Image (cartoon, grey):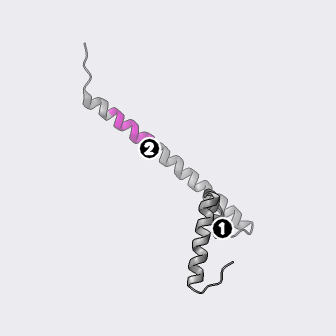
Amino acid sequence: MSTVNPDDIAKDQLTAFVERIERLEEEKKGISDDIKEVYAEAKGNGFDVKVLRKVISLRKQDADERAEQEAILDLYLQALGMPTA
């Protein structure tokens, strides 16, 4: 009868977690590189990348959150005496 050492199980689990995280980090880097390429392509086609990033950010928000942030921005701009849209 063979007994399993608890330290071996923990080591195997730890190794598995580390290897999975490393693979995911590599995939994330690949995706990040792909996104950079798309932004570069958009820039090459005349699009403003800074504004494009803002559009992407806004699309991630729900309508209520976006409206609230826009209202706060307008309030701050007014307080600073800056024209609002």
Q: Is residue 38 magenta?
A: no
Is 46 displayed left or right of 21 in the figure? Answer: right
* Relative image position of residue 65 (x, y in whole percent): 59, 61
* Relative image position of residue 67 (x, y in whole percent): 63, 65
Please tell me which residue lies in front, 49 or 83: 83
- Magenta residues, start to end: 12-20
- Callout 2 amino acid: Ile
Q: In which image quadrant can residue 9 be found? A: top left
Query: In the orientation shown, which residue stands out farthest toward the right?
Result: 45
Please tell me which residue lies in front, 83 or 15: 83
Q: Mark 2 points at which residue?
A: 21
- Callout 1 amino acid: Val
Query: In the orientation shown, which residue stands out farthest toward the bottom?
Result: 81
Please tell me which residue lies in front, 68 or 49: 68
Q: In which image quadrant can residue 52 be found? A: bottom right
Identify which residue is drawn at 66% across, 69% down: 51
Identify which residue is drawn at 42% across, 40% down: 19
Q: Is residue 7 above or below residue 20?
A: above
Is 8 displayed left or right of 58 in the figure? Answer: left
Identify the mark nearer the N-term, 2 or 1: 2
Q: Main secondary structure of the magenta part?
A: helix
